[in-house]
Amino acid sequence: MTLLLKTLTICAVLGAADLAAAAELSLAANTTGKNVNFMREQLDKFEKQTGHKVNLVTMPPSSSEQFSQYRLWLAAGNKDVDVYQTDVIWAPQLADQFIDLTEAAKDVVGDHFPSIIQSQTVNGKLVALPIFTDAPALYYRKDLLEKYGKTPPKTWDELAATAKEIQDKEREAGHADIWGYVFQANAYEGLTCNALEWIKSSGGGQIVETDGSISVNNEKAAAAIERAKGWIGTIAPEGVLAYQEEESRGVWQTGKAVFMRNWPYAYALGNGGDSAVKGKFEVMPLPTASAGEQPSSTLGGWNLAVSKYSEDQQAAIELVKFLSSKEVQKQRALQLSQLPTIASLYDDPEVAAAQPFMPNWKPIFQSAVPRPSAVAKVKYNEVSSKFWSAVHNTLSGDGTAAENLELLEVDLTELKGDSW
Amino acid sequence: MTDLTVADPPAALQRRSHVNSDLQAQRVRSAWVFLAPTLLVLALVAGWPLVRTIYFSFTNASLTNLSGAEFIGFDNYLSWITLKSGRTIFRGLLADAAWWNAVWNTLKFTIVSVSIETVLGLVVALVLNVQFPGRGFVRAAILVPWAIPTIVSAKMWAWMLNDQFGILNDILLGLGLISQKVAWTANPDTAMIAVLIVDVWKTTPFMALLILAGLQMVPGDIYEAAKIDGVHPVRVFWRVTLPLIRPALMVAVIFRMLDALRIFDLIYVLTPNNAQTKTMSVLARENLFDFDKFAYGAAASTMLFLIIAAITVLYMWFGRVNVGGER
C-alpha cells in the first residue's frame, strides 16, 4: 500500500514538473532477446506519466560492437543520444563522458546492492544506475537427464561425461542433430566471460588480479582452457567458435542441446510459447573443476548513464531513475527473467513464483567474478581482446594453451608498462 | 615507343596557341573555374581527413582527447629501446606481428578474390554479350547481388553459412558432399574461404558489367572477318576479343583491387576478430575505436593508404608498359 502511494506521489510530482517542459529524449539500448520490446513498453508508461517523448535507438546485441559505437558518438560530443545503456565493465572507460548521478540518485542508491553501485562508481562519481545484474547459469534439459538417470553435474568433467553420454544415446535414437553442450566461443567479449569462468573455477586466478599483477599464465589456467578445447567437436559443435549468446540460444531453444551456458535472460525466452524446450529445462550454477568448490560466474549486468552532452539532462535523469526503479525492475524480472539489482525484490513472492530460480541466484551474483575492468581502466578492452584471442587460438587448434598464455603474459606485461 | 594518341593533342594545342594565345589563356582560366568546385569538394572530403589522419599518426592522441595530442615523431610506426641487459626491443606498427598478419591477409584476399572475379566476370560477360531471348531480363537479374547493400548480404550469408541452421550445410549434406556440418565462419581453415565465397558472389556482377561494356565496344565486322577466314572461336577469343577488351579489363581489375584492399564491412559482419581474416582496415578500426590507441590506428590507416597507393602505382605502371608494348 505504501509503495502504491509512493508511486502515485512520484507520478504526481513528475507529472507536475513536466507539464512545464516536455522534453524529447533518445535512449540507446541493445537488442538482445526481448530487451527492446520491453524498453518500449516501459517508455510508453514513462511518456504517459511525464509527458516527455522518448525515442529508442537500437544497438547491436554484441557488447563489443555497441561499445565502439558509443565511444565514437561520445568522442564526437553527440547531442542526439541522451541516455546510454551501458555494460557493467564500461564505467571506468567512459566515466568522463557521463554526468555524476550521485546527487540525483541519493534517495534510491541505498536500495541497490552496494557492490553493484560500487562497480559503477569511478573516483567517487556515480557514472550509471543499474537496471539489472547478470550472472550466467548452466541450463540443462531436465527431461533428458531424467530419461537417462543422470544427476545435474557439479564439475566440468561430470558435465562433459553426461553431455557425451546423452548426446550419443540420443543420436542413436534418431535425434541426429543434438549436441551435448553449447556456450559462447566467438572471439569477442563473451569469450572473455566464458574463459574467465573456466579459469577461476579451476583456481587459476582472474587474468589480472585486483592489485594489478598479471596472473593468467599458470598451469591451472592452461589446464582449464585445454579442458574446454576437448569439448569442441566432441560435445559442442565446432560452430561454437563463432557463437555469441543468441546463436547458442538458437541451438538450445530448438531442442538441439543438452546443456547450455547462458545469462538468465534465456530462461524466460526458453519458457516462451514458441520454444521447443518450454517446461523441459532447469538452471543451476556453473560447474567447478573439482567437487565442493565455489562456482564462478562472471559478473555482468547493464546500467543507464546520462551523456554529458545531453541538452535535457534533468529529463534524462528522470528517465534513468524511472527505468532503474523497483517497479520497472520487478517487471523486468517477471517478463524477461533478468536479475534485479534491488535486494528486496529477491523476497518478492510474485518474482519467486514467476522465476523460481531467482531467489537462489542472489548468492551467486554476489560472489560473481568481476572482469579486470576496474584495474585495467582504459586499457581493459585491449586486455580483454588479447585474452579472448589467446583463448580462441587455443580452442581452434592454433597453439597449446600453455604456449598461448605465455605469449599473452608477455603482451599484457608490455601493455601494462609501468602501471595500468 | 612513340604513343600516337598521347603525342597528338599537345602538338595540336601548340599549333592553336600560336594562332591565338589569348583564347588559350582564357580557356585555361575557365577550365580552372569549372574545376574549382570539384577540387574544393575533393580537398574537403578526401584531402582534409587524409591530412588529419597522417597528422594524428605522429601524435599520442586518444579518441577522448584529440585536442590534447602531442607530437611524438615516428614512435607509432617504429621505436626501439635498448634494455640494460643489452637486448633491443622494437615497438610500433612496423614491428607488430598482428599488423603484418593483417597485411598478408589483405593481400591474399585481394589476389584470390580479384582473380576469381575476373575470370567469372569475363565468362558471364561473354554469355550476356550473345543474343538470346530474355537477355535483358538476365542482364538485370545478374546485377541483383551487386545491388544489395554489403551489410545485408553479409548478414544473409552469415545465416546461410550457419553451422546448425544454414542452408549451405543442408544442401551439401543432402548431396552427400560433406559427412558432417561444417562451421564455415568459425573454423580457421574455412573462415577465409567463407569470406571469399560471399565476396565473389557479390562482386562478380560488377566485373561482368564493366567487361560487358568493353565487349560492346568491339566492332562486329572484325568477328565477321574472322568468321569468313574460318578462324576457330577459341583463337578468336585469344587473338581478337581479349586484346580489344584489355583496357576495359584493366580498369575493372583496378577498381576491384582498390575495393578489395580496403575490405572491411563483409569481414566485420562475417568473421570479426578472427585472426585468419583480419584485414588492414579491420585492424585499423579496432585500434582507432575499440582500444584506447587512436594514434596507433591512425598510423595503421596511413600505412594502409601508402600500401594501396604503392600497389596502384605499380599496377598502372606495369599495365601501361604492357599496353604500349603491344601496339
Image: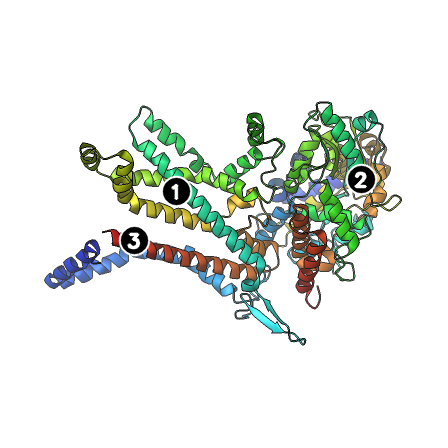
Residue placed at 54% from the left, 35% from the top?
B156
- Amino acid under label 3? Asn
In this view, the residue in front, A67 or B301, is: B301
Kindly state the secondary structure of the residue where label 3 is placed. Answer: helix
Task: Residue under label 1, please give it.
Answer: B118
Task: Give the CA separation, mark 1 to mark 3.
Answer: 18 Å
Kindly state the secondary structure of the residue where label 1 is placed. Answer: helix
Mark 1 or mark 2, which is nearer to you? 1
Q: How crowded is mark 2: few (under 14 residues within 10 Å), some or many (20 or more)?
A: few
Task: Residue under label 3, please give it.
Answer: B322
Based on the displayed image, in which of its 4 quarters is residue B4 positioned? Answer: bottom left
- Amino acid under label 2? Lys
Query: Mark 1 or 3 closer to N-term?
Result: 1
Residue placed at 62% from the left, 59% from the top?
B292
Residue B160 shows in this picture? yes
Kindly state the secondary structure of the residue where label 2 is placed. Answer: helix
Q: Position of residue B126 (x, y in %)?
A: 32, 35
Tell me the tag on residue A57: none
Task: Residue under label 2, please give it.
Answer: A6
Q: How crowded is mark 3: few (under 14 residues within 10 Å), some or many (20 or more)?
A: few
Q: Quadrant of the C terminus of chain A?
A: bottom right
